Amino acid sequence: MTPYALIYTAVLLGLFVLAGGSYGGFYSVGKLWTNAAFIRTGIACYLVAILLALAICLFTPLAALWKIFIVLSCLIYAAIPPVTWRYLAKLHRTPEESK
Amino acid sequence: MDIQDPGFWRAGAISTTAVMLVVLAILTIDSLQDIRAGGSHVPKYDVINQQIGYQYDWTRRMDVPVIGGQQLLFGKLYTEAEAHALMRKGKLVIQSRACMDCHTFFGNGAYYAPDLTKAWLDPAWQQIWMPMTAAKTREDAMVMFLMHPDRYPTWGREMPNLHLDESEAQAVVAYLKWMSAVDTNGFPANFGQTQSQQ
Amino acid sequence: MYRSQKLAVRYFVAAVALFGVMIIAGLLSALYYLHPSLLFDVFNFNMAKIFHIDTLVIWLLMGFMGAVYWFLPQELGREVEGIWLAEILFYVFCAAVAVVSVVFIFVQYGGSNEFSLWFINQGRKYVEAPRWAAVGIVVVVLTFVYNVVATCIKARRMTGILWVLVLDLIPLTLLYLDAFPALTNMSTDLYWWWWLVHMWVEGTWEVLIGCIMAWALMDVMGTSRRIVETWLYIEVMLVLGTGILGLGHHYFWIGTPQYWLSIGGFFSALEPLPLLGMVVHAIYDAGAHHMKTNNRPAFYWILAEAFGNFIGAGMFGFMMTLPQINLFSHGTQWTVSHGHFAFWGAYGCGVIAILYIAKQKISGVNFLDGRAWKWGFGLLNFGLIGMVGGLLIAGIAQAFYERAIGGSTLMAFMAGQENPWFVSGMYARMGFGLIFAAGYVVLVYDLLSAGKHAPKSAVKTQAP
């Protein structure tokens, strides 16, 4: 790994997680306030995460297995916010809750 | 399977933890074999009687220690037991003076002073301290420096005098020599490359 | 209030005081980087560093113990068994901390013998406290375990949270025994040392704070027990599922076999996934209970914990955890940046939230809010983000100039430390550190005065 590759790889990895987190954050706030603009911003963040994952695959000297790992976790990122949200909503809606 | 039942997740938590602990136990048994002095990654203590280098290995794609022919430390051939006793003392000096709260060993410790993983191989001993201390060998220069770091300052951030006597300083030097022969999976990378391209 | 809760308050006071010592020692350590001749040969960097990291461990531990002593009688509806012993040991604990501090200030280090390790300094990062003091900590923790278990048995009642807590206290105690050996072989020494440092911090402590936060959520937001317990199990599963083998990211470079590069890299790179779920959870909870919260500061500190954890552990960790990057970032200020953010997010914010919960009960107000806590919250978080930003810049510069270009030698180290990027990062850290310290002062002021002027509630008292 060259010195410059070290820096841009690390920065790309950090931004990738940040984009995934922003997606989760905006998506959840959008769900909470039933605000479509927030959800759309969240999805835009996710698209950025995809682009960053692509950039990591194309431009960094990481080993192939790590690149596959990044792609897979990018796919899992897509599912986490909606699945978690739905699960939480279900958990809070059960009869015990209304007491 | 009801994922809203806490019992489902309780079972999940217990089984996941158990599986991970079993895997960790197996890996630990294996690793401890490799890292005992004389294991595949960590040399015996009497490696201090030999020459130690650090070179890039193209098959493993990382820097690895290279153990060469005999190169005595302080002009003495140590038996395995003597070397072990010396290392014991060296480690006690390192702990009692809290070296790890300024320096790092294998990158662990504080970050105020240089990493000591490959300190034995540092070209600065030959380039700076041997002329400065007028010592004939690298190990003598190291001992003089360790005993009186205040007399041989190099830059703004100095090492304090921690009152090591000669035998303590020698034990630390031996310890550093042994440590430089540990296979650290290539850490640190390119050590000394800019100074001494060999 | 139960006697156990009164003891909890004492623990909280001690924790906040040690939090202050930690900040002072941290500022001092930061200052050495800018003025290396400061207190040279009088009180060297390593001693300030020892104070900084040891008080960190102790204030958080005291905060956790206080939190358990606070919630335990509430959970079981009875006084904690053997509380008199715990009360005595609190003072023993404080006295031991004081004696160790005096030794660290005036004696500092000893000769290369066992006596030093027993009575002066053990010199292993985080476990510098001499062995006699470590024995004392074992006794205190064992008493704590006895209190919890005996109270559960006497009450003849176990909740899910208590089961998790009791099971967690076993490794918490056992792992601490790792504070005693002084192995000659640095590789095996560090191998076990990481069991203590990583498994405590990223294993047992995570579970412990999970239990405490479960109680806190029920208290502050009125979440139902079934929900918090479900969530606690999920969290335990994810944290230990990734964290136990995540230990491997400390086994890249200490002489351990090469397979740790893949195992450690993989499991620690998984960590952002559960953390993302926790962010969603925090926002959901905020929405579901925002209107109902009766304790604004605790509520916001709990939220800060979720976000701090995601950014500090998730994002900052992911940047540097893959072996190819870690080869260069390991052991630089980059690590320091990640460490500060993750500790703050995972534990600091949580303990402060508990302090506010206790504060509300003690002052007996129905609704806790005000202006000062917002300043404390803002200054502490702003200061922390600034500090880790400065350290990140310094760390990247160090990895770049010292490690990747310079080849990690002494000369390369000096070149890295004198690089303008590095130096500016260190100045930024110092400046933001002062802001953080100002936030601490406001926090203490607010904790001492919060709720004073609010209307008292008529009923909120519980008789033991």
Image (tube, coloured by chain):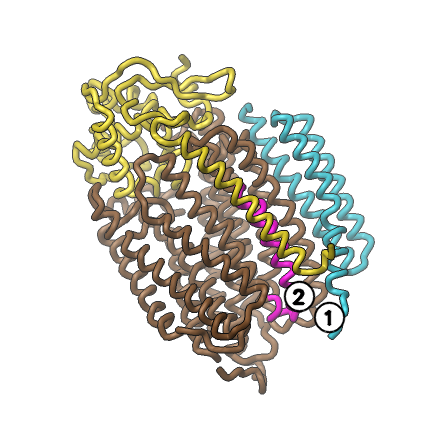
Chain colours: A cyan, B yellow, C brown
Residue C359 rendering spot, x and y as whole percentages:
51, 73
Residue C43 percent across, percent down from the top left: 28, 49
Question: From this viewpoint, which residue is outermost toward the left?
Answer: B166
Residue in view at x 73 percent, y 57 percent: B2
In the picture, residue C412 is in which quadrant?
top left
Considering the image in quadrants, where does the N terminus of chain A appear?
A: top right
In the rendered view, does C195 fall on the left or right side of C243?
left
Q: Is residue C128 visible?
A: yes
Circle number at residue B75: none
The residue under label 1 is A96
Query: Quick check: marks 2 and 1 in contact, CB under 8 Å?
Result: yes
Q: Quadrant of the C terminus of chain A?
A: bottom right
- Check disc 1 and give the amino acid type: Glu
Task: Identify the amino acid type marked 2.
Answer: Arg
In this view, C56 is above or below C356:
above
Residue range in magenta is: C217-246
CA separation in Å, label 2 and label 1:
9 Å
